[in-house]
């Protein structure tokens, strides 16, 4: 089995964090120009929390405080999330 922790780290660093930061930047721009809805403000808070969670997962991987099974579970959830996002972007 390939090193699932390394795979998890790579998908977080190369995909999840940049996409989350880009989306947050868009939300912050809307906030600054006062064109953001209350729902978007809530989404912004959720995305900021999600970003912190991603960073926490990276820290656990770096400190080897996550099992292969836990890493596999998180990797599968992220992969599913990316797949769902891909599908919704292609159907829009």
Image (cartoon, helix red, strand yellow):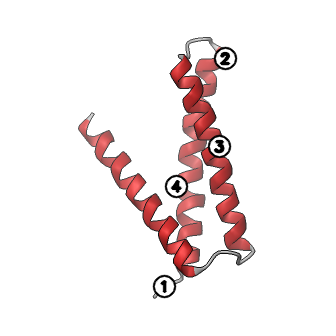
> Measuring 29% from the left and 47% from the top, which residue is drawn there?
87
Q: Residues within 10 Å of mark 3 (few under 14, many from 20)?
A: few
Asked whether, in this view, residue 57 is left or right of residue 7, the answer is right
Residue indicated by mark 1: 2
Residue 66's quadrant in the figure? bottom right
Q: Which residue is mark 4?
A: 15
The residue singled out by tag 3 in the image is: 49
Rendered image: mark on residue 35: none
Instruction: State which mark lies toward you, 1 or 3.
Output: 3
What residue is shown at x 41% (from left), y 53% (from top)? 82
Residue 8 screen position, x and y as percent:
54, 69
Residue 9 position, x and y percent, is 59, 67
User: In the displayed structure, would residue 12 be above or below residue 87?
Assistant: below
Near-viewer residue (73 or 24): 73
Q: Which of the marked residues, 1 or 2, is nearer the chain's N terminus?
A: 1
For image coordinates 67% across by 72% down, the residue present is 61
Q: Quadrant of the N terminus?
A: bottom left
Mark 1 and mark 2 in contact? Answer it, CB < 8 Å.
no
Give the label on residue 32, or none. Answer: 2
Judge by depth and name the residue closer to the eye, 3 or 42: 42
Give me the C-alpha separation between circle 3 and circle 2.
20 Å
State which mark lies toward you, 3 or 4: 3
């Amino acid at each position: 089995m390939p090193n699932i922790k390394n795979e998890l780290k790579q998908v977080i660093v190369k995909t999840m964090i940049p996409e989350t930061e880009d989306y947050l930047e868009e939300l912050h721009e809307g906030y600054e120009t006062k064109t953001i809805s209350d729902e978007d403000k809530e989404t912004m808070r959720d995305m900021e929390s999600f970003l912190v969670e991603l960073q926490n997962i990276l820290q656990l991987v770096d400190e080897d405080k996550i099992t292969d099974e836990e890493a596999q579970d998180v990797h599968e959830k992220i992969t599913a999330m990316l797949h769902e996002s891909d599908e919704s972007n292609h159907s829009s």
